[in-house]
Amino acid sequence: MIAELILALAPQAPALHGPPASGPAAAPRPQRVLVDRLVAIVNDEVITEQQVIGQVRALVRELGDNRYSPDEMYLFAFRSMLLDLLFQEGFKLEGDEGLLDRLVEDQMQSQIERAGSVAALSEFLRQEGITLQAYRQQIRRQYMAYMFRLGEEGERPTGGKSGIKNEPRFVRPSEIEEYYNSHADQFRVEHRVKARMILLQDEQGLPPASERIRELAQRIGAGEISFADAAGQYSKYFPSRKGDMGLKPPESFEQALRDFLTTASEGQTSAPIQLSSGWALVLVEQVQPGGMRPLSDRAVQLRIIGELLQGRDQEIFQAAIRRLRERCYLWGPQVDAALEDEPSAD
C-alpha cells in the first residue's frame, strides 16, 4: 500500500520521424507530473489518495503515538471516508432533507455564535483556506452520513435543542439468560483480597526482625497504634501507602502469604509470617469471594443488554453497507477490502 504520494516525472518522448530540428533549440516538452490519483468512486463522488493521506496525517496528530502501522492507518482513514460517502448516498436515497436543513442551520448558527459574528467566522475559515459556503457544504455532508447511520440504528435526530430521539429497543429476558449461560467466563470473578502488610527486616544495631514484629503485633493488639499507622512508621513495604497491598488474588503473592490470604476473613490479622524478605504482619481489610456473579445482579444484566444491542447494531450496520453496495456504483482497488465485515468479538 502506498503510504506517501510519489511524484513521478515521465520521461520526455523521443522524436518519431526525421532528424533533430535545426536552428534555435526547441523548448523542452512539458513533463507530466503525477500529483494525485483516484482510489475510490461512489456514484458521482470520488476519493483521492491525497485526501486519504491528509486524513492519515490528521489522525496521527490526534492520536499522538505509533500504535498502528502506516498501512493500518491508511486503511482506517480510507474506510472511514468511504463509509461517509456511502452513507451520504444512502441519505440521498432515503433521508429527510427538511430535517437535514434544520440540523445544518442549527450547527451554522452555533458556530457563528461561538465565533461572535458571521464576519468573524468567515475570517477564521479564510485563514483555514475554506469559504463559508464550502464549510456549510462540509457540515451538510457530515450530517448526511451521521443521520443515515443513526436511522439504521433506530435513532432519529430531531433538530434544535431536542437532540436525538431514541426509538425504544427491547431485549427479551430469555435472550439475557441465554447470553449469560453461553458466556459464563465473562462473569466469573477471581477470589481477591485487599490487605495491608508490615514488613520488618534485620538491621544492624536493632533486635532481630522476628522479635520486633512480635512486639509490634502486641502493641497493635493492645490498641496502642493502628495497623495502618504502624505500617507507615515501621514497614519496609510501601510505607508511603501504609503497607497497602491492593486488591489482588492470593496467588499473586509468595507461598507463605498465599497460605494466609486464601483462608483469611475480613478484619483478620495474621500471626508473624516469615518471608524471603523478612518478617511480616498482614491485616485483611476486604475479601472478594471467587465464583460466578449472579444473573440477578443488575450490573450483569445491563452489561448483557449492552452487548446484545451492540451486536444488533453491528448486524444492522453491515446489512446497511450490503444494501447500499447493491444500490450505488462503487469502484476502487481497495473498496472490497475496506468494506469487508469486521470480525465479531466473542
Image (cartoon, helix red, strand yellow):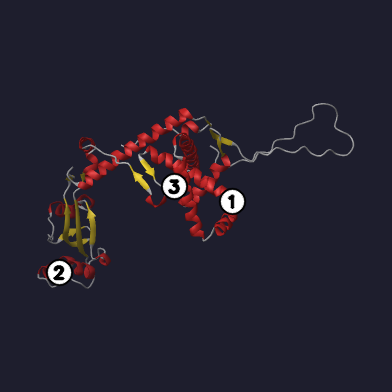
Say the numbered circle drawn on residue 131.
Answer: 1
Type of amino acid under label 1: Thr
Say the numbered circle drawn on residue 236.
Answer: none
User: Which mark lies nearer to you, 1 or 2?
Assistant: 1
Question: Residue at (49%, 30%) from the top-left corner?
Answer: 328
Other-residue count near label 1 (Cα within 10 Å), few / some / many at <14 / 14–19 / ≥20: some
Q: Is residue 233 above or below residue 343?
A: below
The residue singled out by tag 3 in the image is 67
Type of amino acid under label 2: Leu
Question: Residue at (35%, 39%) from the top-left corner?
Answer: 154
Residue at mark 3 to residue at mark 1: CA–CA distance: 35 Å
Residue at mark 2 to residue at mark 3: CA–CA distance: 50 Å
Type of amino acid under label 3: Arg
Residue 320, located in which quarter of the rendered image? top left
Q: Earlier in the sequence, mark 3 or mark 1?
A: 3
Residue 41, located in which quarter of the rendered image? top right
Q: Is residue 39 above or below residue 107?
A: above
Question: Residue at (20%, 69%) from the top-left corner?
Answer: 229
Contact (Cβ within 8 Å) of mark 3 with mark 1: no
The residue singled out by tag 2 in the image is 216
User: Which mark lies nearer to you, 3 or 1?
Assistant: 1
